[in-house]
Amino acid sequence: MPADSPSTARTSLSAPLPKPGSQSALREQNQQRVIAALMSGGPQTQAELSRQTGLSTATVSNIVKVMAATGIVSTAPTTSSGRRALSVILNDNGQVAAGIDIGRRHLRVVLASPNYRVLQEASVALPLGHSAVDGLTAASDLLDSLLDNGGIRRRALLGAGIGIPGPIDRRTGTVVQGAILPEWVGINIHETFSERLRVPVFIDNDANLGALAQVTWGPHSAVENLMFMKVGSGIGAGLVLNGSLYYGNVGVTGELGHTTINEQGVICRCGNRGCLETVASTSTMIELLSRGSNETVDTQRIIDWVLAGDTAALRVIDDAGVAIGRALAHMANLINPETIVIGGPLTSLGEILLEPVRRGLARHAVPIIGDTTSVCMSSLGDRAEALGAAAVVLAQQGLAPALASSA
Amino acid sequence: MPADSPSTARTSLSAPLPKPGSQSALREQNQQRVIAALMSGGPQTQAELSRQTGLSTATVSNIVKVMAATGIVSTAPTTSSGRRALSVILNDNGQVAAGIDIGRRHLRVVLASPNYRVLQEASVALPLGHSAVDGLTAASDLLDSLLDNGGIRRRALLGAGIGIPGPIDRRTGTVVQGAILPEWVGINIHETFSERLRVPVFIDNDANLGALAQVTWGPHSAVENLMFMKVGSGIGAGLVLNGSLYYGNVGVTGELGHTTINEQGVICRCGNRGCLETVASTSTMIELLSRGSNETVDTQRIIDWVLAGDTAALRVIDDAGVAIGRALAHMANLINPETIVIGGPLTSLGEILLEPVRRGLARHAVPIIGDTTSVCMSSLGDRAEALGAAAVVLAQQGLAPALASSA
């Protein structure tokens, strides 16, 4: 599909993937194998591709023909073992995928090439309570300025992945009531963004994209079952199960910020009491630590205090960590992930937050789960969501992350 | 693979399925489509099979050739629209799959035909604390007597699925320490049963098999994401996610009996405090209701009391139900299932137990999850696990449950 035609904007929430096990899924998988071989091994003959991928020479020849016709690869005559052959070269074409991460107070855009290199990247602050239209305009403007900076034509844009900090009802394509972005509730984000950006658009929850980033750009590409938990003003998780992003029945998964921690605790924005968010979100930390302070407290201030050894701040982090660990234990008891990755603005605290999380997990998980579940901080920092958003676009192009790198 | 040869007993814990998307997975999927068409439509020509399945005539012809060679189908000359054709007939062959469910106090064996009809079925009581060897001997004896009753030769046995009420570490094939069957801990069940039964053996956790039964024999065959929760002396769940049984990292999933309900509650057998099992298992109910009673209380007695309107028994069920609902809410917030099915010895309580479970779920789930998750009792009663065990064997033979029925 040409990316430069406005009429090609996809109308689905996320473009449908071929049915697993179908002929087209197999063809796409085989194409990904060939692309991966070209990405890792550089230009090579069809015979070499056949050896590297384990596919028959006839299959490789067919795939190369299709990819050459769509401009993904070029071919050039060469010789191999003294015989005439065709060298297959992966085209760059200057094509790019955009990854857009819209938060309550921030916006980040990355531009990535088909071989998973970050070409351009920038983030800006957004005013708290910005409208959907303002957020969209800011995203569109930042995208345009990154394209300009990189000297990239707009028609080279393959599509845009967009992460939203709220659960998305996949039946309607709208943000669910009660989400962290009340200004966005009920708006059909896909339609709105498609009209504005005029490229294929893929919307997803930010924690889902963070999870995807871990297994594409991050160091966890071999992990089949991974939970990515974002701790910020809200707390939510994205799940990679059996190697794929998991969406459940209506698309609202990973809502572990609303696990009851104190049955008689304070009222949560979801309407329940004593949810994990009421004891471990950064908003709660700010509220707790503002009480004894004349200064304006924000997340960065809390991080500074913790790193400086402030007792109250350390205690707030410790209590939050144990509560997070307890919620994670119950989730791990259910889905037995190999790895839990924690993301969000507190990742720079490292072991100071991880230690109480692991303590809470070990205390509340059944022993074999506690012993076999690893917990670590996201090495992608606050870039995970935008990188995951770009990965969605590339995956839709059949471009597998063989050599993904966030460098 | 011939089922009558002792040397063919599989050595894997559960036989490996072909990699999704591979040529062999596709072949198997296509074969299942043809079998499903034959099961629903009866004997028919290859042209008819091609129309019904959407597969090309060449593909159907290849599949029929392979299945005829392995004895799954026979072919016979016929005419179609006045032309000579080949009628394809699904063989019954008198082959059977055994499903064995071993509990703390019971044993159930079913024999099922390749078209998912239950041919023979029986259950017996086992003494509490029976050894693994005693359980195995009882299972083997009951299996033999069912084969005798049905006039089925032992060589017609395709294999045996075996459900165990404890988590299984799939890395070692052993029951995990702390399981409900302490007498079985550390024994390699697969090896032990394979040696004894001398057919391919497939071991799984009983809640997993109960979940599988819901989507094969039960009324939930269209459900992609289902949680089966067994409430008995222990509490555990099996998960069907994206249409398949989900195993996680080491095979220990659905341990929601150990969700903390009371942080300072009584000590649980897992070593934690106040787990769901300490407030909602039948063992806890028996303990609570024994206090005021001179009679020996068991699960059936509790059910009788509840149905007769006994206030204390009703209160115990209500409290248990709300606690179960709370744990289910947290799980549903995470994996957003379409349906939660409750099984185990209390299913006959129906709405009396379901009502407080739904109340607890609605109270603790985020609203969209509470609104879209259905909760019901297993219509398979205490047969679910054994039926699921037989389904595992049939699935391994490539026999899809197109017309599965527990009747």
Image (tube, coloured by chain):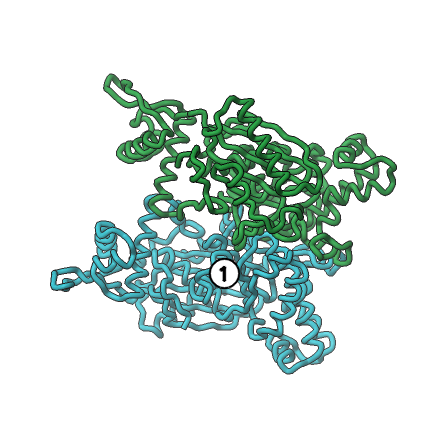
Chain colours: A cyan, B green
Using the image as rendered, state which of residue A41 and residue B169 is in the foreground. B169
Residue A190 visible to an observer of this rendering: yes
Q: Position of residue B30 (x, y in %)?
A: 36, 37
Mark 1: give few (<14), some (14-19) or many (20+) Cα within 10 Å: many
Q: Position of residue A150 (x, y in %)?
A: 34, 73
Q: Is residue A45 above or below residue B236?
A: below
Left or right of residue B35: residue A325:
right
Q: Position of residue A312 (x, y in %)?
A: 71, 76
Using the image as rendered, state which of residue A333 and residue A381 is in the foreground. A333
The image quadrant of residue A314 is: bottom right
Q: In the rendered image, which quarter contains the C terminus of chain B?
A: top right
Looking at the image, the residue that sits furthest to the top is: B82
Left or right of residue A308: residue B244:
left
The residue positioned 68% from the left and 80% from the top of the image is A310
Q: In the rendered image, which quarter contains the N terminus of chain B?
A: top left
Q: Is residue B22 above or below residue B388?
A: below
Q: Position of residue B304 (x, y in %)?
A: 78, 31
Name the amino acid, label 1. Ala
Mark 1: secondary structure: helix
Q: Which residue is mark 1?
A: A211
The image quadrant of residue A137 is: bottom left
Using the image as rendered, state which of residue B300 and residue B227 is in the foreground. B300
Q: Is residue A143 above or below residue A18?
A: below
